[in-house]
Image (tube, helix red, strand yellow):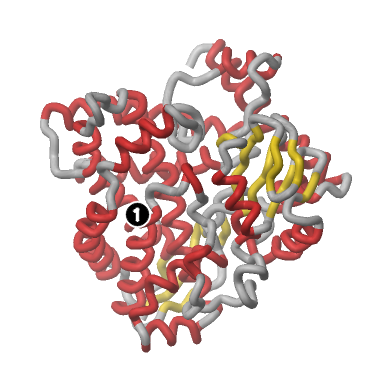
């Protein structure tokens, strides 16, 4: 990397991470609820953040802050995420000095929360892009992956030694999603460990307020994945397989196909978002069942409840805490007038505990009839394309674990991920019998 590249990275870090982090910390010191949430999120569990959710809820459907608005109201969150008056991501204004600096410092490679990623684009580009991807990532395609996922889960669980200490995140929660992603992307067996390493390092790209070293690690992983993808796409064009990514390379709609960068961006999104969030779903579920053994007993007696149980895990312990949106014109949201360029923090974990929607919202209940009403997959045009895949992986992965292993004893020494937006476990020491 040249000296000018390092300067550009410094600008990206300063404007994209250091400055927002400083503003959030200053706001928190002055009692700003949005600032407090952003700063506490790195060190507090989701359960520990619930009192703060309730403080925000007490301010109404759209709580005003020094930074913008925050909402934990289920209806308001859905309205924001579905509104044509807001856009994904947060900008600084087309003509601002900071925007010009960021444009100068922009990376050439892919990033899961920067265009052309579907997380960061809006119609009409988003509509065309999503339509093409949806033609391949169908419910039927996910159903066809179920048998393979069941076999992968069985192989991973059979490799875990009984009676010895094991880190379930390393041995299972991380391995199952990356193997499924490898199936989707058509990754050769010889490359799968490398893809796991890149996915693990790149996952923090979805977080905010990264430190300098964290950003450097993330960008290095994204650059490595970008380079690997260039070679991989060449292989798939020469020798296409039956995998979904090969189908996506060939997909077209009215003569239009995804560009090279859009294909890479889709793969990057599958890796960064689809990998880490499913790792968190599995790890969060294992922890919840350890804390609520009566719920696991219910599932063992009534295994038909497993799909609902996965949604209840997603509701009470979502893999993603919040997401940001920016208003694009003066409008009214949830009955509150909001100005153009205002930032709205939609707290998914808070909306999932809205007492107007969920009775006894802090209770983990695998029988909950409306567990599926959570917003952990977002809503509107940016609703997670991988929702069906995540639900399937969660159901298959958890059911296999507790069907094949009679007892999962969690041991001391578990560590949470030191991230604000992504919610999960970095390690879960356990002994299985």
Residue at x 43% of width, y 32% of height:
126
Residue at x 77% of width, y 36% of height:
23
Residue at x 88% of width, y 45% of height:
30
Foreground residue among 231 and 68:
68
Q: Quadrant of the C terminus?
A: bottom left
Foreground residue among 273 and 383:
383
Foreground residue among 223 and 102:
102
Numbered circles on residues, count: 1
Place of residue 190 in the rendered image (x, y in percent of width and height, measured from the top left)? 21, 42
Place of residue 65 in the rendered image (x, y in percent of width and height, measured from the top left)? 80, 44
Q: For label 1, count other residues whose C-alpha is less than 10 Å away and answer few (under 14), some (14-19) or many (20+).
A: many
Label 1 residue SS: helix
Residue 323 occupies quadrant: top right
Horizontal side of 7 relative to 147 (left or right) equals right
Residue at x 69% of width, y 37% of height:
331
Horizontal side of 328 relative to 239 (left or right) equals right
Name the residue tied to disc 1. 177
Residue 133 occupies quadrant: top left
Q: Is residue 108 visible?
A: yes
Up the image or down, 237 lies above or below 147; here it is: above
Q: Is residue 419 visible?
A: no
In the current view of this chain or complex, which residue is farthest to the left?
239
Up the image or down, 196 lies above or below 267; here it is: below
């Amino acid at each position: 990397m040249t000296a000018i590249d390092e300067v550009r990275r410094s600008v990206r870090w300063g404007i994209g991470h250091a400055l927002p982090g400083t503003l959030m910390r200053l706001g928190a010191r002055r009692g700003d609820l949005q600032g407090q949430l952003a700063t506490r999120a790195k060190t507090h569990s989701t359960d520990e953040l619930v009192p703060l959710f309730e403080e925000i809820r007490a301010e109404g459907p759209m709580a005003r802050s020094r930074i913008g608005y925050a909402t934990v109201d289920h209806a308001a969150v859905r309205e924001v995420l579905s509104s044509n008056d807001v856009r994904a991501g947060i900008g600084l204004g087309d003509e601002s000095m900071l925007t010009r600096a960021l444009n100068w410092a922009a990376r050439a490679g892919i990033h899961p929360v920067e265009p052309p990623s579907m997380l960061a684009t809006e119609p009409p580009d988003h509509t065309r892009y999503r339509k093409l991807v949806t033609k391949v990532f169908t419910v039927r395609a996910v159903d066809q992956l179920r048998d393979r996922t069941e076999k992968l889960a069985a192989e991973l669980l059979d490799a875990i030694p009984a009676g010895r200490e094991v880190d379930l995140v390393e041995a299972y929660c991380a391995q199952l999603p990356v193997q499924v992603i490898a199936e989707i992307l058509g990754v050769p067996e010889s490359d799968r460990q490398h893809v796991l390493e890149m996915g693990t390092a790149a996952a923090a790209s979805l977080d905010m307020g990264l430190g300098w070293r964290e950003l450097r690690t993330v960008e290095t992983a994204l650059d490595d994945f970008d380079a690997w993808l260039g070679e991989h796409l060449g292989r798939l064009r020469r020798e296409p397989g039956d995998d979904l990514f090969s189908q996506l390379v060939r997909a077209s709609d009215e003569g239009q196909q995804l560009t090279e960068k859009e294909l890479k961006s889709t793969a990057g999104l599958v890796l960064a978002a689809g990998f880490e969030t499913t790792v968190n779903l599995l790890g969060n579920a294992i922890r919840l069942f350890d804390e609520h053994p009566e719920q696991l007993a219910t599932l063992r007696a009534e295994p038909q409840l497993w799909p609902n149980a996965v949604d209840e895990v997603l509701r009470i312990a979502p893999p993603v805490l919040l997401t940001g949106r920016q208003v694009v014109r003066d409008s009214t949201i949830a009955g509150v007038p909001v100005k153009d360029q205002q930032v709205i923090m939609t707290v998914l974990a808070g909306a999932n505990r809205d007492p107007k929607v969920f009775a006894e919202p802090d209770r983990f209940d695998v029988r909950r009839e409306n567990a599926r009403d959570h917003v952990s997959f977002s809503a509107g045009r940016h609703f997670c394309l991988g929702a069906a895949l995540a639900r399937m992986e969660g159901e298959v992965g958890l059911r296999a674990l507790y069907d094949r292993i009679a007892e999962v004893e969690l041991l001391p020494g578990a560590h949470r991920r030191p991230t604000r937006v992504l919610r999960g476990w970095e390690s879960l020491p356990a002994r299985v019998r």
